[in-house]
Image: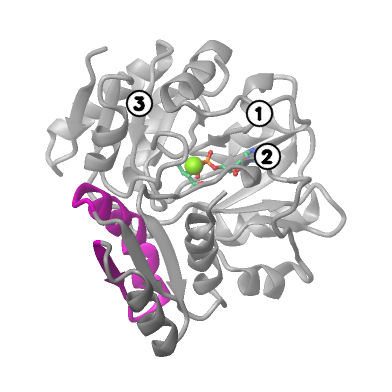
Amino acid sequence: MHTQIFTITGTNADAESLSQAADIIAQGGLVAFPTETVYGLGANGLNAQAVQNIFTAKGRPLDNPVILHIADYNQLYTLVRSISATAERLITEYWPGPLTLLFPKSSLVPDVVTAGLDSVAIRMPNHPIATEFITLAGCPVAAPSANRSGKPSPTQAAHVVDDLFGSIDAIIDGGEVAIGIESTVLDVTQSTPQLLRPGAVTKEQLEALIGTVTEVRHSNVPRAPGMKYKHYAPTAQVVVVDSQHALHAALAMHASATVRVLSYPNAELMAHQLFRDFRECDAQGVQVIIVEAVPEDHLGAAVMNRLLKASRKE
Ligand code: TXA
Ligand code: MG
């Protein structure tokens, strides 16, 4: 398959590029696009066959549901059966933004989107290109991260090219993303909201607004179907260290391997660069990536979640 690349340049040509990309969605094709979190691989979320093709292109297991991306509130009402008071407050405060919410799905949403679940995940991205693209497509855009399944999420168009060029119809190149890790996923269909995936809207921020939020730890009975799959992993082995002592021990242990040490001054920069650095290490044939931990609160909780998943060997 030929993959078209639309580069957004900040000129008048952008409108034409985005309308061509949106036409591809309307016709059932697959287009990768930037959001503020990571790049998504989009399809018309109401076209079951198009959504099915996302799974094929990514090599994604069919039991892992995808998020519907919307650009205006009117779209939301057609996709859900109800909106709780808690959901209303979160939407008012954090949409558009890196917060995905679960709702009871309406009959309009194809089963392939939700992997047969009764709930649908919806997000309104905060990125001008994503907003314009979704608006022009005229439908909710189903989109997982635009990586091959199991690889780190793409934070720039070149990462999408590496993973999916030749397997999808088009890529909108809107430069590097702002945040660098995927959105917070919150289940507000339960009486106590459950954090299914930590992200840039932090647990602390959520609890300040809506009270106690329970957190789903890794278990054999995953609440978010995606939780049971290894994620965000480079080919290299990832070792996490939380002290200088542990760093020296890890360096000694891997003395005969090609090693790279990654260290970040804070969680924001770690979120912004971690996935890109993973990909760079793989491209350079690094065998062991040693990463210095950051404190596990606020955004640190989200980025450490990705790091620890990448370091798990199963
Ligand atoms: O920032 C993001 O969320 C990016 C951008 C493109 O929006 N998207 C993204 O999608 O990370 P994906 O498919 O890579 O991750 C979505 C997560 C998965 O863990 C999936 O299992 C969970 O959300 N999920 C989606 N729908 C769900 C549902 N109905 N119930 C429970 N979990 C759901
Ligand atoms: Mg993903």
> In the rendered picture of this protein, how many numbered marks are placed on residues?
3
Q: Which residue is mark 2?
A: 225
Identity, as a three-letter code, of the amino acid under mark 1: Asp
Among all residues in the image, which is located at the extreme front? 256
User: Tag 2: residue type?
Assistant: Pro
Q: Is residue 29 above or below residue 310?
A: above
Q: Are marks 3 and 2 in contact (CB under 8 Å)?
A: no
Which quarter of the figure has residue 145?
A: top left
Say whether disc 3 or disc 2 marks the residue closer to the N-terminus: 3
Q: Which residue is mark 3?
A: 31
Earlier-in-chain disc, 1 versus 3? 3
Residue at image point 34% right, 45% down: 154
At a point 34% along the width and 78% down the height, the residue shown is: 252
The picture quadrant for ligand 1 comes to top right
Rendered location of residue 233, percent (x, y): 43, 50
SS for dot 3: strand
